[in-house]
Image: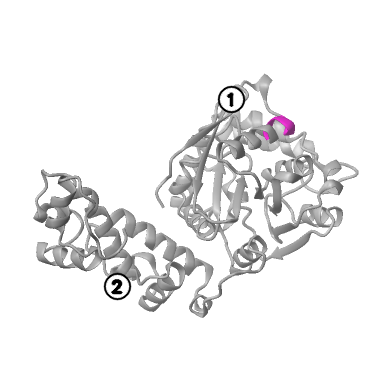
Amino acid sequence: MQTGRTNYARSGGVNIAYQEFGSGDTCLIVVPGWISNVEQFTSIPPLAAWVNHLSGFCRLILFDKRGTGLSDRVNESELPGMDQRAEDLLAVMEHAKIDRAAFFGLSEGGPLGIHFTATYPEKVSKLILFGSFAKWVRSEDYPYGLNEEGHLKTINYMAENWGGPVGLQLMAPSVKDDPEAQQYWASYLRHSASPSAAIALYRMNLDIDVRHCLKKIKKPVLLIHREGDKLVECGHSKFLKENIEGAKLLLTKGADHLPWFGINREELMAMQTFLLDGNVVSDKRLDKLNPEDIFAIYSIKDHIEKHFEEEITINSLSRQFGINDFKVKSGFKALFATPVINFLNQTRLNYSLRLLSDPRLTMSDIAEKVGYKHPNNFSTAFKRRYGVPPNKYRGELMQGKDPKQKKAF
């Protein structure tokens, strides 16, 4: 997946960065955790695949909270409370022309999702909370999580180690020893916040307590939590279930805190079913795929879109992405409703339309740039797809005409 366009919503005097993916009647706004960067998620392959999966069945909005990522930085004396962050969310919705949406609150994004739902119920259709909590610091009346002393030790650790893969052993223990994961996680953190901003925002989170909002939640709520979560113990979500009327709790296996690591089919299907009111199109070919296979196929689609000019075969994709030929073919067609080779050819031909508007390029140049070794093969494929040969298409285009096509572009 290529990074989309970053838009900015104005909230008071602060610019809030967001991106939009996918389409459909269902809109899902992801409320990120502690820090984020909307243009860096593609640097984490599992995260990019997770975003790809969600945008495959809904309109998806990602945004950076003020003080993080590409949104405006703020002074420590101006750190936002829940009310301010809720107004930022409203600004994003207004700028994106969204009247009502479902929300996915991840970790520290969950309390903001809870506060927003309680404050602006008319703006919320449903709420998903993943690995989240109502209160961040353990107390006598809330026996979950770290006490204040434990959090201060975490802050000291961050101050000494920022720049490296801080917290990966808690966020995603399944990949904590993977050098590639360490590298892209450290880079993602650096792009998401400066050391002082990261620490200031963490300190701010020590004040989070939205327990007073829980009884006000009257929307459908789905809670998902890994039983072995190393960062936020599952007792937090059990507390939420007990105090949010009608909330459903799905406890799954695993220790990773971030949903795009250690993914499992149960979580993916639960989210999709919840958001689409049970109207999930089931394809038996997908039953033969585990979540890692599904995410690999999304990565294959991204690879084709970025490298379509190269020689690509089913066998080469199978070797590169560690998934057998049968799964590549059947899984790709099940997920994207077209055979993988058809998608490759369509991607090449769609790009050729742009090149044909450049009179400096010969047909041989264009054929080569879109991955055809022989211009005749390119011309044959183009005519089959669009109803006219490419040279005739170019001629009509240069005359300002609308080229007649057998099929819509």
Residue furthest right as drawn: 141
Could you tell whether 162 is left or right of 308 in the image?
Answer: right
Q: Is residue 74 magenta?
A: no
| Relative vertical location of residue 85 with respect to residue 253 in this rendering, above or below | above
Between 104 and 22, the one lying in front of the other is: 22
Q: Which residue is mark 2?
A: 315
- Labels 2 & 1 near each other (Cβ < 8 A): no
Q: How many marks?
A: 2
What span is colored magenta in the figure?
81-85
Q: Nearer the viewer, residue 408 or 164?
A: 408
The percent coordinates of residue 111 (x first, y second) are 73, 43
| Residue at 61 percent of width and 63 percent of height | 272
Residue 67 at what x, y percent from top left?
A: 59, 29
- The amino acid pointed to by label 1 is Val
Q: Nearer the viewer, mark 2 or mark 1?
A: 1
Q: Quadrant of residue 81?
A: top right
Q: Quadrant of residue 333?
A: bottom left
Identified by mark 2, the residue type is Asn
Image disc number at residue 86? none
x, y percent for residue 257: 63, 53
> Disc 1 designates what residue?
14
Q: Secondary structure at mark 2?
A: helix
Task: Determine crowd level at label 1: few under 14, some 14-19, many 20+ residues with C-alpha closer than 10 A.
Answer: some
- Element assignment for label 1: strand
Packing grade of label 2 (10 A; few <14, some 14-19, many >=20) is: few
The CA span between labels 2 and 1 is 50 Å
Q: Position of residue 51 (x, y in %)?
A: 51, 54
Give the residue at x 39% y 69%: 322
Q: Earlier in the sequence, mark 2 or mark 1?
A: 1
Q: Residue at x 77, y 62 (%)?
A: 248
The image quadrant where one finds the C terminus is: bottom left
Q: Would you say the magenta stretch is mainly helix, strand or loop?
A: helix
